[in-house]
């Protein structure tokens, strides 16, 4: 979390460590009762960004929080130790010192760095001492169709390499075929394999066909112990969208009402502008409450978003529109 | 600590005010004093009243109170402009409407901010809903102007239209009134509501720039007295009113018998029905749009929540959770959900109704939001433990107050939904197609929204059933309000003196509930040499009673079956040819057999049309469709002309029967014989008991009972022995729809679609879809 310069109290951290999701038995009645009306959700999603906005200092503060919630990500076939290092350095120092000073903020870093298993140990090394967790995508990311045993092993490897968070992908066919038992068992096994590492369940919403399936998959994964539910791998034709976010947030709320557990939400893929990140933050505030305005319960999976936020913050400070080349690459 | 760091601790929403400088400049440029727009010029007011910003109580400017003389001037200007406006033709008018639409878009933010400051509704709504819908309305109607002549050959412009609009959607209601009127070649005098005149004044300026010819659009401001002057003005051909049912009734009475065309869009207490299989979270979000849109000051607000008992507590809990994040505040803030109530008086009314509800046992929950210190604000409110017997379940509150009740079955949902004097709109939430369309068909309301609410578009008709008024705005159906039927008339009807016919004394009775019955009063009168029963008020009452109980199933009877019954009627009439011709003869003379042939043709026409006057599918800009149903009005009383005795009687009865109405038909006074002969024929033709009731007697007496009867939904006054004044005045009781020939000799051989149009009311059913 941001360290806020406070002359009296010294550095204060916003508190509360996330409680793990205890999970619960598979309640199929609940799963079957879930229905989502697509047009109604889309209407809500269309009007929401026009109902809420933050301006000036408020916008600057919200954008800083957005940075703190970014899982700064690189998931490309051409990743190397070099570009992972560059990314980690950016995660440690997402804003220039000059900008930080103007904003009156002592330090800020991203919520996590997210990489393939291959670069977990590098990232752990590059981030040492920063307090920034390393997240690994796992279980045959992005399709999730490698042998089940191998998917579990992949989790074990990443955890033993130092990953603090594991982003698993679910088997879409379980959802498309309505095999909720299989999805529940799979998710439960992944959660167990993660051990102390927090687990984010990637639903690959763009491949689930209907919003009702998104709702049901969300419910099953939460019951099976997912700490976060996440929209997408970033590799589907459609990734994070506000309608998916509304559906998943509503399920997180209902799960909390049923069990008391707070589950995190991570939209990923396609979130490139500062405005978009604010929309998601505002959605969290309105649908789930202020507890979700924190990296403990909210992350954005993104790679280029940070650059746009930097430009907007510079604009807030200087009153001039900025350019990408003025900010260090991640 | 820096301000940013401070905010970062809790991340509240900060202020996000819309810049009102351009609007303030517009007000200043006018010296904050406004005149009225008449004949293309601005006239100064003799006296003024203040327009107040309800968000903070500040005065925005002085609005002219139009004098009677100025109203006269406006009517004269509109009258003068009429011939040239019509002579311009549809294409020229289309261009002007198009120009208005363009200009509304070009000045959209000025309109939005001005409207928000004058009315108190959030800038999000004026910016994203009101103003875009206004532009769309003018674009859409520009199209109709272009094709009017080809599409409506049986119709002509009405003439000078007086239009009176409310304060809840000042500019949008103006557009709903002016766009169709202009498109159909009329000229208008429009009076905005006293609380909210400013956007109409800006609109007048836009019209001026758009090249609207002088006198075509006249905007006159003022209080109810100005409205009264418009309503009572002898030189106005049509009154269109949107507002309270109370004022609607006054207007109905004031225009009775004047031949002024009338459309009324009045109050509502619209049900919002949530079935247990609905997407409950989306339904709750729908409620935000239903009752917390425009602070609940919406005539079609979903103000009565009906939720299936098994999920009621769950839904109430979800509503309370949702209410906690509603933001109430300065309407110019871009991130508020609710702004200010339009006026202190309205705020007081809301307060007292909510208090009354609590007194009667309702449990009150209000959003835990902060209200601004100045201005008129009311928090979003949910009243549970409300039953139909509660005042708040029946009375229109016109504020952000939702009342909630439960139901057990679909049938009970319909019964509760229809348990109101109103019938403007309804929402139905279910994922089940069968339930959705079945409930939509049974709800008595002009607009049904399936899994959505408060949807409006220029292409779809909007308007009420029952005491929510009559007439439609939007769509093809809305255009008829600004068109006058080219009434087919004949120069003169034959009326030969009655000659005594049969030798054996016959006892003619009344036909009520499928049986011939003696009149309650035991009196008869003589016509065409025979004695006919004099029906009295009790007979009329009995006829309405049986009609009411027969109507619902008649309307549900397959249209094909209704058609078959009418063919059978023709067949049986053919069998009674001699008898019917003889019955016509005493007054029809030589043309009796010709009239008989025409009558048979008419029956065949309505037999044919019974299953062919179908609804349509509108194409509003969303994924889904809006389908319309031409639904029966209900129980309709008809008064037949004196002659032609058979053709006239059938002409004012058959269209109604064909469309599924139940009819109480009063026969010609001077020759009721053909109607009486029809009794046995109807009985033999499988027309279900109660669908077609026939009374004989004195129009002057019967029309009073029928027009006054709150169970009669419509009245066709084609009597040539009484004027339309009485029935139109008395119709105000339940705002039943009336149609009168005003004593003209209608050509009943006409098969104009107008008869079927008048025999039905249009229901628009919105069905968004998406897998």
Image (cartoon, rainbow, N blue to C red):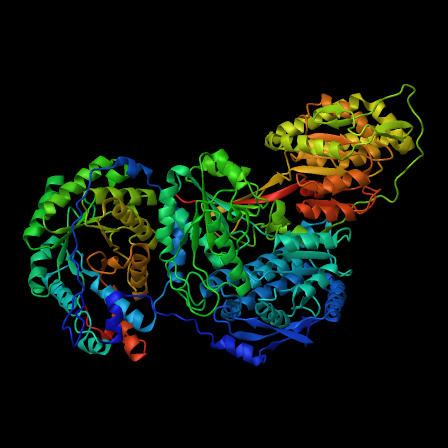
Q: Is residue B485 visible?
A: yes
Q: Position of B201 compared to A254: left or right?
A: right
The image quadrant where one finds the C terminus of chain B is top left
Q: Residue furthest top?
A: B504
Up/down of B488 relative to B380, above or below: above
- Residue B58 in the image, given as x and y percentages of width and height: 51, 74
Tell me the quarter of the image containing the N terminus of chain B.
bottom left
Residue B749 found in image quarter: top right
The answer to whether any part of residue A307 appears in the image is no
Is residue B640 or residue B118 the one in the foreground? Answer: B118
Q: Nearer the viewer, residue B235 or A256?
A: A256
Corner quadrant of residue A176? top left
Residue at 65% across, 53% down = B248
- Image coords of residue A54 (percent x, y): 34, 67
Q: Position of residue A74 (x, y in %)?
A: 18, 59
Residue B19 lies, in percent from the top left, at 44, 74
From the viewer's side, name the closer residue of B110 and B363.
Answer: B363
């Amino acid at each position: 979390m941001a360290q806020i310069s406070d002359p009296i109290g010294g550095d204060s951290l916003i508190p509360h460590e996330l409680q793990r999701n205890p999970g619960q038995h598979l309640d199929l009645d609940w799963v079957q009762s879930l229905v989502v009306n697509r047009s109604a959700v889309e209407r809500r999603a269309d009007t929401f960004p026009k109902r809420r906005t933050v301006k000036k200092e408020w916008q600057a503060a919200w954008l800083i929080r957005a940075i703190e919630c970014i899982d700064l990500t690189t998931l490309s076939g051409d990743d190397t130790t070099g570009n992972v290092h560059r990314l980690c350095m950016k995660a440690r120092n997402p804003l220039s010192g000059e900008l930080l000073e103007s904003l009156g903020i002592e330090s800020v870093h991203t919520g996590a760095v997210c990489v393939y298993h291959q670069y977990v140990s590098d990232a752990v090394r590059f981030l040492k001492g920063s307090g920034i967790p390393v997240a690994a995508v796992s279980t045959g990311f992005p399709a999730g169709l490698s042998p089940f045993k191998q998917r579990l092993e992949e989790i074990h490897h990443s955890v033993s390499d130092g990953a603090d968070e594991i982003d698993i992908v679910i088997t879409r066919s379980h959802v498309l075929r309505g095999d909720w038992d299989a999805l529940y068992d799979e998710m439960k096994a992944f959660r167990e394999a993660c051990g102390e590492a927090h687990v984010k369940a990637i639903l690959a919403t763009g491949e689930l066909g209907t919003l009702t399936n998104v709702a049901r998959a969300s419910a099953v994964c939460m019951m099976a112990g997912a700490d976060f539910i996440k929209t997408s791998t970033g590799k589907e034709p459609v990734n994070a969208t506000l309608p998916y976010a509304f559906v998943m947030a509503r399920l997180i709320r209902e799960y909390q009402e049923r069990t008391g557990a707070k589950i995190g939400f991570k939209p990923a893929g396609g979130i490139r502008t500062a405005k978009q990140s604010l929309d998601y933050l505002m959605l969290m505030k309105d649908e789930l409450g202020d507890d979700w305005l924190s990296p403990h319960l909210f992350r954005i999976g993104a790679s280029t978003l940070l650059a746009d936020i930097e430009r907007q913050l510079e604009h807030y400070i200087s009153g001039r529109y900025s350019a990408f080349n003025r900010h260090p690459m991640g | 600590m820096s301000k940013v760091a401070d905010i970062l601790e809790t991340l509240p929403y900060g202020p996000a005010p819309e810049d009102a400088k351009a609007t303030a400049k517009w007000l200043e440029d006018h010296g904050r004093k406004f005149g009225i727009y008449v004949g293309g010029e601005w006239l100064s007011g003799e006296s003024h009243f203040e327009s107040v910003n309800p968000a903070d109580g500040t005065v925005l400017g002085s609005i002219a109170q139009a004098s009677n003389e100025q109203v006269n001037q406006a009517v004269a200007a509109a009258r003068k402009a009429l011939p040239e406006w019509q002579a311009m033709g549809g294409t020229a008018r289309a261009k002007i409407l198009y120009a208005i639409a363009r200009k509304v878009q070009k000045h959209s933010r000025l309109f939005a901010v001005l409207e928000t400051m004058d009315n108190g509704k959030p800038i999000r709504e004026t910016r994203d809903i009101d103003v875009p819908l206004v532009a769309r309305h003018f674009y859409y109607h520009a199209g109709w102007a272009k094709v009017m002549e080809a599409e409506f050959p049986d119709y002509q412009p009405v003439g000078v239209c007086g239009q009176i609009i409310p304060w809840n959607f000042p500019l949008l209601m103006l557009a709903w009134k002016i766009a169709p009127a202009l498109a159909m070649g009329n000229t208008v005098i429009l009076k905005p509501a006293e609380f909210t005149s400013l956007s109409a004044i800006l609109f007048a300026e836009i019209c001026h720039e758009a090249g609207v010819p002088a006198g075509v659009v006249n905007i006159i401001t003022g209080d109810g007295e100005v409205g009264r002057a418009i309503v009572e003005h002898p030189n106005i051909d049509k009154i269109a009113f949107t507002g309270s049912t109370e004022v609607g009734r006054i207007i109905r009475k004031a225009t009775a018998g004047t031949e002024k065309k009338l459309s009324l869009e009045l109050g509502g207490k619209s049900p919002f029905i949530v079935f247990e299989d609905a997407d409950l979270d989306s339904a709750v979000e729908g409620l935000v749009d239903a009752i917390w849109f425009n602070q609940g000051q919406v005539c079609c607000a979903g103000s009565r929540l009906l939720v299936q008992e098994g999920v009621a507590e769950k839904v109430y809990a979800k509503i309370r959770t949702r209410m906690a994040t509603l933001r109430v505040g300065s309407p110019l803030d871009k991130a508020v959900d609710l702004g200010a109530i339009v006026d202190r008086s309205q705020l007081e009314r809301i307060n007292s109704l909510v208090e009354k509800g609590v007194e009667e046992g309702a449990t009150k929950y209000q959003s835990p939001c902060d209200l601004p210190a100045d201005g008129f604000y009311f928090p979003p409110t949910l009243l549970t433990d409300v039953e139909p017997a509660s005042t708040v379940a029946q009375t229109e509150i016109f504020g952000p107050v939702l009342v909630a009740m439960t139901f057990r079955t679909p049938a009970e949902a319909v019964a509760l939904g229809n348990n109101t004097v109103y019938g403007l709109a309804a929402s139905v939430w279910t994922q089940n197609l069968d339930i959705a369309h079945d409930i939509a068909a049974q709800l008595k309301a002009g607009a049904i929204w399936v899994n959505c609410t408060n949807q409006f578009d220029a292409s779809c008709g909007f308007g009420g059933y029952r005491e929510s008024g009559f007439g439609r705005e939007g769509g093809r159906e809305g255009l008829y309000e600004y068109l006058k039927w080219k009434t087919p008339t004949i120069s003169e009807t034959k009326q030969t003196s009655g000659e005594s016919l049969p030798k054996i004394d016959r006892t003619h009775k009344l036909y009520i509930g499928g049986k011939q019955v003696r009149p309650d009063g035991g009196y008869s009168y003589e016509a065409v040499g025979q004695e006919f029963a004099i029906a009295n008020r009790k007979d009329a009452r009995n006829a309405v009673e049986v009609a009411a109980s027969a109507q619902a199933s008649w309307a549900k009877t397959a249209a094909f079956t209704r058609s078959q019954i009418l063919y059978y009627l023709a067949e049986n009439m053919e069998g009674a040819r001699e008898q019917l011709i003889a019955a016509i003869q005493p007054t029809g003379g030589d043309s009796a057999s010709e009239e008989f042939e025409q009558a048979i043709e008419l029956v065949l026409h309505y037999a044919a049309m019974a299953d062919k006057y179908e609804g349509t599918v509108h194409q509003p800009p969303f994924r889904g469709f809006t389908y319309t149903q031409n639904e029966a009005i209900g129980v309709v009383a008809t008064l037949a002309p004196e002659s032609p005795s058979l053709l006239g009687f059938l002409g004012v009865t058959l269209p109604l029967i064909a469309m599924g109405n139940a009819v109480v038909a009063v026969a010609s006074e001077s020759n009721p014989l053909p109607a009486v002969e029809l009794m046995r024929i109807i009985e033999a033709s499988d027309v279900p008991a109660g669908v077609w009731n026939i009374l004989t007697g004195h129009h002057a007496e019967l029309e009073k009972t029928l027009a006054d009867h709150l169970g009669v939904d419509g009245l066709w006054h084609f009597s040539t022995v009484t004027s339309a004044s009485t029935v139109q005045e008395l119709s105000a009781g339940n705002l039943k729809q009336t149609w009168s020939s005003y004593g003209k000799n209608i050509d009943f051989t006409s098969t104009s679609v107008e008869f079927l149009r008048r025999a039905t009311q249009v229901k628009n059913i919105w069905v968004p879809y998406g897998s």
